[in-house]
Amino acid sequence: MSAAPLARAGALLPHRLALAALAALAIGCERTPDTPGTPGAAGPNRPAATLAAPAAADLTPHPDAPAGIDWHAGSVESAFARAAAERQPIFLFWGAVWCPYCADLKAHVLARRDVQDRLKLFVPVYLDGDDPGAQKWAERLGVSGYPTVLALAPDGTELARIAGGMELDVYADMLDLVLADVRPIGELLDGVASMDGTLSREACRRLAYNGWGLEEPAAGPARMAELLDAAAERCPADAREERARLVAIATSYAVEAERSAGASRAPGTARLERLVGEVRALVADRALAAGTVDALQYLGADFFAAARQLASAEDRARLVADWAAVMRAAAADARFTEGDRLLAMRSVLTAVRELGGAPPTPELEAEARALVDAALARTAGTPASAGAVNAAVNVLLALEDLERAYEIAEAAMHTSRTPYYHMADLALLEERMGRTDAALEWLERAYRESAGAATRFQWGTNYVRGLIRLRPDDEAAIRAAAIAVLGELDGPDRLYRRTAGRLATLDAALRDWAAAGERAAAIRARMAEICDGIPAEEADALAACRGFLAG
């Protein structure tokens, strides 16, 4: 996911990490907590919903689709028809032109020859969140965060979600696993609880490397912790790395389940206590932990908070030292992308501060800064620079070096194809430094210069929320901005998935602001006009529209 939002870390990292371990700006790549659950949406435990296909025609070839892959040239609906006719699975890339970790995925993974060779056995589909009808397809497929990669059966059943943050040579292996075993990933997981005996090595590996954290599961965190914990126990004895990965991911869900139970319930269930102990043992095994770095990064500040309560002072100190050693090794490992290496260092800083209870030492600060400088130098002028810049800003935020973070974001803005993305970072940094007028100027400019229906509504929502937060008495400005931003919803198939989530966020902010009177009457009237343009058969979109500021 989160308090202080700057975020970006979703993407080549699991989105749960982005929510748990990194500060997350509401317009970042990752799925955010305000994205509503959708009954019937696709996910790890169910096939795609039977929403009517969007009205969009051809969505590809997209100008940002990476070369070397024979992307399907037609609508998403026609891609499913082709997959059924050719008896091939679908490989669907869901991203956005402005998303830095989408660029990282393209530069480091989709450009690999071994991955491209495997994709000849799929029907590859490239779907940008601003394509016509894209948000409705996202609703149907159960995706929100950018980027998400899905392997799907021709009937839309999910075979795998492929997360980022892994060693680069793992991705082709993941595609091989999908091609060899086309059982739905949800069916595979659900069967774990009732099975006798041991999982096959291949099934264990599919479960261990699936991108569970890319969306909130329908089963809920407690059930996911139970199932993934059971899967770890049923993996073959020699599948040590796969078992370790499943333990780490199960622990992240167990921590989330405890947190969701409420503040009155201190961490301490038997499962959570055991899993925290298993993670401590895993991290102490440096060789084993080296192959599970991305899975360990599902764990963040909430995990460290649980470990503080469940471990002795001696065990906490040992965990901090082991965690730092593992993540620092990953930060120096060229098998990971530059962005992921920086985020490994960010994980070190989080562990030291949250679990160790102290700020980083001057030596650790110097090491982190040197890593930032080296990563930026190595990626300058390349497609990988977007992910490195994003991660560098997050590292510097962890170091509370706002000025240097600002300098990097501003420089990136001047060279980026989508400068509005970095304007959002600059707005946050200005706000953190107490310069509210400058922050609002950046938010307004970012909205004005953004492009694409879903993107403009996302950035516009951020601008309106900024006005409410920083200038709540400027009723005229808030009213005018809100009415303009709602205008981005005019058009077919727009009020779905990410856009629906942003609307819920905007609704909550405006309700709080207008609670004392009729401040929002004109805004409600504009929304009523938009609702009138939504056809009756679009029941979910119409309900979301009519629920805005109602009652």
Image: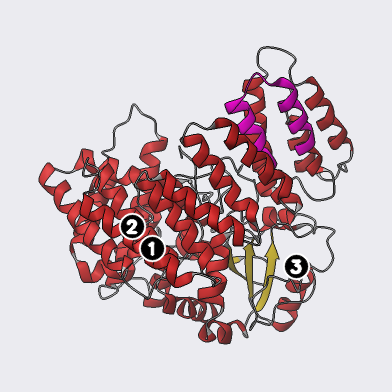
Q: Amino acid at mark 1?
A: Asp
The mark closer to the camera, 3 or 1, is 1
Q: Residue at x 33, y 64 (%)?
A: 293
Q: Secondary structure at mark 3?
A: helix
Badge number at residue 336: none
Q: Amino acid at mark 3?
A: Val
The residue beneath circle 2 is: 369
Relative to 326, 212 lies left or right: right
Q: Is residue 22 visible?
A: no
Q: Earlier in the sequence, mark 3 or mark 1?
A: 3
* Image x and y of residue 109, in percent: 52, 75
Q: Amino acid at mark 2?
A: Arg
What is the quadrant of residue 194 in the picture?
Answer: bottom left
Q: CA separation, marks 2 and 1?
A: 6 Å
Identify whether 16 is placed above or below 533: below
The residue beneath circle 1 is: 373
Identify whether 355 is placed above or below 67: above
Q: CA separation, marks 3 and 1?
A: 41 Å
Q: CA separation, marks 2 and 3?
A: 44 Å
Identify whether 201 is placed above or below 504: below
CB-based contact (under 8 Å), mark 3 and mark 1: no
Q: Secondary structure at mark 2?
A: helix
- Assess disc 2: are there few (<14), some (14-19) or many (≥20) residues with their C-alpha within 10 Å of its C-alpha: many
**Magenta stretch, main secondary structure class:** helix
Colour scheme used in the picture?
secondary structure
Q: Residue at x 71, y 20 (%)?
A: 475
The residue beneath circle 3 is: 76
Q: Which residues are magenta?
A: 460-485
Task: Tell whether position 422 is magenta.
Answer: no
Q: Residue at x 43, y 69 (%)?
A: 377
